Amino acid sequence: MSSVPHLRLGVNIDHVATVRNARGGAHPDPVQAAKLAIEAGADGITAHLREDRRHIRDDDIARLKAVIAKPLNLEMAATDEMVAIAIKTRPHAACIVPERRQEVTTEGGLDAVGQHNLLAPVISKLVGAGIRVSLFIAADPAQIEMAARLHAPVIEIHTGAWCDALAEGPGGVAEIEFARIRHGAILASNLGLEVHAGHGLNYATAETIATLPEIVELNIGHFLVGEAMSVGLPQAVRSMRAAMDRGRAKAVPR
């Protein structure tokens, strides 16, 4: 029986930049936050360079790539501008996400089925540059199967619907949404895809999702930055790592 793989923690530092940009200047510095997260146990750093640059900026990405000691995961829209930046910067990974100017944060998963003609050349260019590509999608069989056909090596399952349902109470919709995530992760793994997950996760939900052996990486940001205001970012990261480890200890190889 094979062992369950290590569950990596990617810390998204977007909202450190949100606080900085609210007043201008250079404080707090998302790059310093990234260093603190890595020292506390993060396996990598995620940052979303949006078209409107509402939080992370181009120089943040350049500095992150230059100074952090762990992999950088660049969240990006499938646009010519972002592809050019990714190829120039050469992050370890690029996660293609949907993006709309009017949204507060990324809402829902990418429509890989409807946008396959747009995504195919983007994925090809990024993979050709040696960048690990992931698609941020819902745990929907059609989307997962399309990701495999597009030769994206990784998917990141959008966990927001499950987390939102849990906020309304356990059971019912929450159980249905978690079952979708579980079945989606199994399908993706069977198709040869590496499976990540993220959006809306906290200590409790991260511990629960860590029990799914097919998922090998969680990307978490907003909750950790919020917790950092009370306990500091290093402690928040350590507590998240501990929650993930507790959940992983319960995972059983399939």
Image (cartoon, helix red, strand yellow):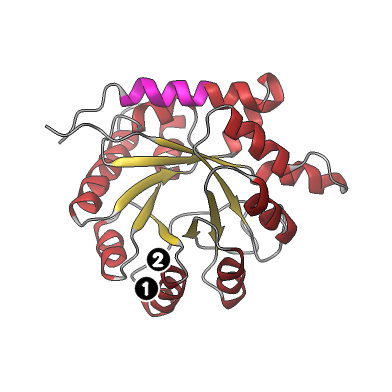
Q: Position of residue 75 (x, y in %)?
A: 54, 57
Is 240 inside the magenta-drawn segment?
yes
Residue 41 - label = none
- The amino acid at mark 1 is Gly
Q: Residue at x 43, y 22 (%)?
A: 243
- Whether 200 is drawn above or below 126: the answer is above
Residue 111 tag number: 2
Q: CA distance from mark 2 to mark 1?
A: 5 Å
Task: Inspect this view and state whether residue 169 appears.
Answer: no
- In screen coordinates, is 60 left or right of 166? right
Residue 233 in the image: x percent, y percent? 65, 27
Q: Quadrant of residue 128?
A: bottom left
Instruction: State whether the magenta stretch is mostly helix, strand or loop.
Output: helix
Question: Disc 1 marks which residue?
Answer: 114
Q: Quadrant of residue 83?
A: bottom right
Q: Where residue 10 sits in the image (x, y, percent)?
A: 50, 41
- The type of residue carrying mark 2 is Asp
Labels 2 and 1 touching (C-beta < 8 A): yes
225, 253: nearer the viewer: 253
Instruction: Judge whether 138 appears above or below 81 on screen.
Output: above
Magenta residues (range): 239-248
